[in-house]
Image (tube, rainbow, N blue to C red):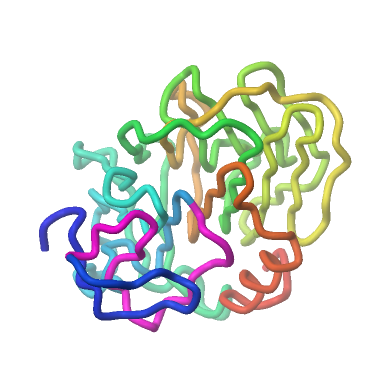
Protein backbone atom coordinates (compact mmCIF):
# COMPACT_ATOMS: atom_id res chain seq x y z
CA UNK A 1 0.00 0.00 0.00
CA UNK A 2 1.60 3.35 -0.97
CA UNK A 3 2.61 5.56 1.94
CA UNK A 4 -0.02 8.18 2.80
CA UNK A 5 -2.90 6.56 0.83
CA UNK A 6 -5.45 4.49 2.65
CA UNK A 7 -8.84 2.97 1.84
CA UNK A 8 -11.81 5.05 2.94
CA UNK A 9 -14.23 2.19 3.57
CA UNK A 10 -14.05 2.18 7.37
CA UNK A 11 -15.84 4.65 9.62
CA UNK A 12 -14.66 5.70 13.09
CA UNK A 13 -17.28 7.47 15.23
CA UNK A 14 -16.86 11.22 15.02
CA UNK A 15 -14.30 11.10 12.21
CA UNK A 16 -14.80 12.49 8.71
CA UNK A 17 -15.04 9.84 6.01
CA UNK A 18 -15.78 10.68 2.41
CA UNK A 19 -14.80 9.93 -1.14
CA UNK A 20 -11.25 9.83 -2.36
CA UNK A 21 -8.12 7.88 -1.61
CA UNK A 22 -8.04 8.32 2.13
CA UNK A 23 -5.45 11.13 2.18
CA UNK A 24 -7.85 13.68 3.72
CA UNK A 25 -6.07 15.39 6.66
CA UNK A 26 -7.14 13.95 9.98
CA UNK A 27 -8.26 10.62 8.52
CA UNK A 28 -7.19 7.51 10.37
CA UNK A 29 -5.65 4.81 8.18
CA UNK A 30 -7.32 1.48 7.52
CA UNK A 31 -6.81 -0.09 10.94
CA UNK A 32 -10.27 -1.71 11.31
CA UNK A 33 -12.75 -1.47 14.13
CA UNK A 34 -10.49 -3.55 16.38
CA UNK A 35 -8.56 -0.46 17.54
CA UNK A 36 -10.28 2.03 19.84
CA UNK A 37 -9.37 5.62 18.87
CA UNK A 38 -8.45 8.09 21.62
CA UNK A 39 -10.75 11.02 22.35
CA UNK A 40 -10.44 14.24 20.40
CA UNK A 41 -8.17 14.80 17.41
CA UNK A 42 -4.54 13.91 18.20
CA UNK A 43 -1.85 15.30 15.91
CA UNK A 44 0.32 12.23 16.54
CA UNK A 45 -0.92 8.83 17.64
CA UNK A 46 1.36 5.79 17.92
CA UNK A 47 -0.27 2.59 19.17
CA UNK A 48 1.71 -0.61 19.67
CA UNK A 49 -1.53 -2.42 18.82
CA UNK A 50 -1.18 -1.22 15.21
CA UNK A 51 2.47 -0.39 14.61
CA UNK A 52 2.11 -1.23 10.92
CA UNK A 53 -1.23 0.57 10.57
CA UNK A 54 -2.90 -2.82 10.05
CA UNK A 55 -3.34 -4.20 13.58
CA UNK A 56 0.18 -5.68 13.46
CA UNK A 57 -0.89 -8.17 10.82
CA UNK A 58 2.50 -7.80 9.10
CA UNK A 59 4.58 -8.16 12.30
CA UNK A 60 5.81 -11.16 14.27
CA UNK A 61 6.98 -11.30 17.86
CA UNK A 62 10.61 -10.17 18.22
CA UNK A 63 10.68 -8.31 14.89
CA UNK A 64 12.62 -5.06 14.60
CA UNK A 65 10.45 -2.00 13.99
CA UNK A 66 11.64 0.17 11.11
CA UNK A 67 8.45 2.22 10.72
CA UNK A 68 5.77 2.99 13.29
CA UNK A 69 2.70 4.31 11.49
CA UNK A 70 1.28 7.60 12.73
CA UNK A 71 -2.49 7.34 13.17
CA UNK A 72 -2.86 11.04 14.02
CA UNK A 73 -3.87 14.00 11.88
CA UNK A 74 -0.32 14.74 10.66
CA UNK A 75 -0.57 11.52 8.65
CA UNK A 76 2.16 9.50 6.99
CA UNK A 77 4.56 12.47 7.13
CA UNK A 78 4.52 11.95 10.90
CA UNK A 79 5.47 8.27 10.83
CA UNK A 80 8.24 7.26 13.20
CA UNK A 81 11.17 5.72 11.34
CA UNK A 82 14.54 4.17 12.09
CA UNK A 83 16.61 3.32 9.02
CA UNK A 84 19.48 1.63 10.89
CA UNK A 85 18.69 -1.98 11.80
CA UNK A 86 20.77 -1.99 14.98
CA UNK A 87 18.97 1.06 16.34
CA UNK A 88 15.44 -0.28 15.92
CA UNK A 89 13.19 -1.24 18.85
CA UNK A 90 11.68 -4.71 19.08
CA UNK A 91 8.02 -5.69 18.75
CA UNK A 92 6.62 -7.60 21.74
CA UNK A 93 3.39 -9.33 20.79
CA UNK A 94 2.57 -9.90 24.46
CA UNK A 95 4.04 -7.11 26.54
CA UNK A 96 3.44 -8.81 29.90
CA UNK A 97 0.97 -11.58 30.66
CA UNK A 98 -1.86 -10.35 32.86
CA UNK A 99 -0.88 -6.68 32.53
CA UNK A 100 -2.40 -3.88 30.37
CA UNK A 101 -5.05 -6.34 29.13
CA UNK A 102 -2.38 -8.47 27.47
CA UNK A 103 -1.57 -5.81 24.87
CA UNK A 104 1.55 -5.46 22.71
CA UNK A 105 4.48 -3.05 23.15
CA UNK A 106 7.69 -1.80 21.57
CA UNK A 107 10.82 -2.57 23.57
CA UNK A 108 13.60 0.04 23.55
CA UNK A 109 17.13 -0.37 24.87
CA UNK A 110 19.33 2.72 25.33
CA UNK A 111 20.83 2.50 21.82
CA UNK A 112 17.43 2.36 20.10
CA UNK A 113 15.12 5.19 19.11
CA UNK A 114 12.71 6.38 16.41
CA UNK A 115 11.99 9.81 14.96
CA UNK A 116 9.62 11.57 12.56
CA UNK A 117 10.48 14.02 9.81
CA UNK A 118 9.56 17.66 10.36
CA UNK A 119 5.83 18.36 10.33
CA UNK A 120 3.88 21.55 10.96
CA UNK A 121 4.97 23.51 14.02
CA UNK A 122 2.78 23.19 17.12
CA UNK A 123 3.15 25.91 19.75
CA UNK A 124 2.24 25.34 23.38
CA UNK A 125 0.00 24.35 25.02
CA UNK A 126 0.70 20.78 23.89
CA UNK A 127 -0.23 17.51 25.58
CA UNK A 128 1.74 14.26 25.30
CA UNK A 129 0.18 11.12 26.76
CA UNK A 130 2.11 7.88 27.17
CA UNK A 131 1.60 4.33 28.33
CA UNK A 132 5.08 3.14 29.19
CA UNK A 133 7.01 0.67 31.31
CA UNK A 134 10.45 2.05 32.23
CA UNK A 135 13.13 -0.46 33.19
CA UNK A 136 15.20 2.14 35.03
CA UNK A 137 14.61 5.44 36.85
CA UNK A 138 15.77 7.68 34.01
CA UNK A 139 15.25 8.23 30.27
CA UNK A 140 13.12 10.10 27.74
CA UNK A 141 9.83 8.60 26.64
CA UNK A 142 8.96 11.18 23.96
CA UNK A 143 10.25 14.56 22.79
CA UNK A 144 10.45 16.83 19.76
CA UNK A 145 12.71 15.74 16.92
CA UNK A 146 15.63 18.15 17.29
CA UNK A 147 17.67 20.02 19.90
CA UNK A 148 15.60 23.23 19.65
CA UNK A 149 11.97 22.14 19.42
CA UNK A 150 11.66 20.25 22.69
CA UNK A 151 8.64 18.96 24.56
CA UNK A 152 10.41 16.22 26.54
CA UNK A 153 8.50 13.88 28.86
CA UNK A 154 11.12 12.02 30.85
CA UNK A 155 11.87 10.27 34.10
CA UNK A 156 14.85 11.36 36.15
CA UNK A 157 15.67 10.32 39.69
CA UNK A 158 12.59 8.06 39.46
CA UNK A 159 10.17 11.00 39.12
CA UNK A 160 8.24 12.25 36.09
CA UNK A 161 9.64 15.47 34.65
CA UNK A 162 9.25 17.85 31.68
CA UNK A 163 11.68 19.92 29.63
CA UNK A 164 10.79 22.43 26.93
CA UNK A 165 14.00 24.35 26.33
CA UNK A 166 14.58 26.17 29.63
CA UNK A 167 14.54 24.06 32.81
CA UNK A 168 13.34 20.77 34.24
CA UNK A 169 9.89 20.77 35.76
CA UNK A 170 9.81 18.05 38.41
CA UNK A 171 6.32 16.77 39.15
CA UNK A 172 7.64 14.74 42.14
CA UNK A 173 5.25 11.96 41.01
CA UNK A 174 6.89 8.55 41.20
CA UNK A 175 8.19 6.97 37.98
CA UNK A 176 8.68 3.50 39.41
CA UNK A 177 10.67 1.08 37.27
CA UNK A 178 9.30 -2.23 35.95
CA UNK A 179 5.62 -1.30 36.07
CA UNK A 180 3.28 0.19 33.46
CA UNK A 181 2.34 3.86 33.87
CA UNK A 182 -0.18 6.07 32.13
CA UNK A 183 1.11 9.65 31.97
CA UNK A 184 -0.43 12.88 30.66
CA UNK A 185 2.00 15.78 30.30
CA UNK A 186 0.83 19.35 29.70
CA UNK A 187 3.44 21.70 28.25
CA UNK A 188 2.19 25.22 29.01
CA UNK A 189 5.08 27.27 30.51
CA UNK A 190 4.29 28.04 34.18
CA UNK A 191 0.99 26.14 33.98
CA UNK A 192 2.68 22.89 32.97
CA UNK A 193 1.64 19.78 34.89
CA UNK A 194 1.92 16.00 34.77
CA UNK A 195 -0.86 13.55 35.53
CA UNK A 196 0.65 10.16 36.30
CA UNK A 197 -1.57 7.18 37.09
CA UNK A 198 -4.54 9.52 37.56
CA UNK A 199 -2.77 11.83 40.06
CA UNK A 200 -2.07 15.41 38.91
CA UNK A 201 0.98 17.40 39.97
CA UNK A 202 1.06 21.03 41.06
CA UNK A 203 2.29 23.56 38.52
CA UNK A 204 5.64 25.17 39.33
CA UNK A 205 8.87 25.79 37.45
CA UNK A 206 8.30 26.46 33.76
CA UNK A 207 10.00 23.84 31.56
CA UNK A 208 10.18 26.47 28.80
CA UNK A 209 8.05 27.67 25.90
CA UNK A 210 9.43 25.59 23.01
CA UNK A 211 7.19 24.32 20.23
CA UNK A 212 7.39 20.94 18.48
CA UNK A 213 7.57 20.18 14.76
CA UNK A 214 8.01 16.41 14.94
CA UNK A 215 8.53 13.62 17.46
CA UNK A 216 11.26 11.39 18.87
CA UNK A 217 10.51 8.22 20.86
CA UNK A 218 13.06 6.54 23.13
CA UNK A 219 15.51 9.45 23.17
CA UNK A 220 15.49 13.22 23.66
CA UNK A 221 15.50 15.59 20.71
CA UNK A 222 19.16 16.41 21.40
CA UNK A 223 20.01 12.66 21.33
CA UNK A 224 20.51 12.39 25.13
CA UNK A 225 18.70 10.53 27.96
CA UNK A 226 17.85 7.30 26.09
CA UNK A 227 15.06 5.09 27.39
CA UNK A 228 15.30 1.51 28.58
CA UNK A 229 11.76 0.20 28.59
CA UNK A 230 8.54 -0.53 26.72
CA UNK A 231 6.39 2.02 24.91
CA UNK A 232 2.78 0.94 24.51
CA UNK A 233 1.10 4.10 23.24
CA UNK A 234 1.88 7.77 22.57
CA UNK A 235 -0.92 10.30 21.92
CA UNK A 236 -0.08 13.96 21.22
CA UNK A 237 -2.50 16.90 21.12
CA UNK A 238 -1.83 20.42 19.89
CA UNK A 239 -3.21 23.67 21.30
CA UNK A 240 -6.96 23.71 21.66
CA UNK A 241 -7.40 19.99 20.92
CA UNK A 242 -6.69 18.47 24.34
CA UNK A 243 -9.54 16.44 25.83
CA UNK A 244 -10.32 16.79 29.52
CA UNK A 245 -8.37 14.54 31.87
CA UNK A 246 -11.52 12.57 32.67
CA UNK A 247 -11.96 11.61 29.02
CA UNK A 248 -8.33 10.55 28.75
CA UNK A 249 -8.62 8.53 31.96
CA UNK A 250 -11.69 6.75 30.62
CA UNK A 251 -9.97 5.98 27.32
CA UNK A 252 -6.80 4.50 28.83
CA UNK A 253 -8.74 2.62 31.51
CA UNK A 254 -10.99 1.14 28.85
CA UNK A 255 -8.12 -0.05 26.68
CA UNK A 256 -5.62 -1.21 29.33
CA UNK A 257 -7.50 -1.65 32.60
CA UNK A 258 -8.22 0.82 35.36
CA UNK A 259 -5.53 -0.09 37.92
CA UNK A 260 -2.44 2.13 37.60
CA UNK A 261 0.47 1.57 37.85
CA UNK A 262 0.30 -2.11 36.92
Instruction: Identify the magenta region.
Output: 21-42
Q: Residue 44: image x %, image y %? A: 45, 50
Total numbered circles: 0
Q: Is residue 22 above or below residue 139?
A: below
Magenta-colored stretch includes residue 40: yes
Is residue 91 or residue 250 the one in the foreground?
250
Of the 4 image quadrants, the one containing the N terminus is bottom left
Q: Residue 181: image x %, image y %? A: 65, 58
Q: Is residue 1 above or below residue 223?
A: below
Q: Is residue 111 above or below residue 132?
A: above
Residue at point 41%, 47% (across, down): 108
Q: Main secondary structure of the magenta part?
A: loop
Q: Is residue 243 left or right of residue 67?
A: right
Of the 4 image quadrants, the one containing the C terminus is bottom right
Q: Residue furthest front?
A: 19
- Give the quadrant of residue 259: bottom right
Magenta-colored stretch includes residue 122: no
Q: Is residue 64 left or right of residue 254?
A: left
Amino acid sequence: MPSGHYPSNLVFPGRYVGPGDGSFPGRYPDISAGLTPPPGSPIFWFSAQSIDGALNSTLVDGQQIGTWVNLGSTGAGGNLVQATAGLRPTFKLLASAGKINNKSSALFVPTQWMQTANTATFAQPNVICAVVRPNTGSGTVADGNDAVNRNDILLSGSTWQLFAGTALYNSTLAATANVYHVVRSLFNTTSSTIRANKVTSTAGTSPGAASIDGMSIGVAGDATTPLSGEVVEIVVYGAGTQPADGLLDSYFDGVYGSSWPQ
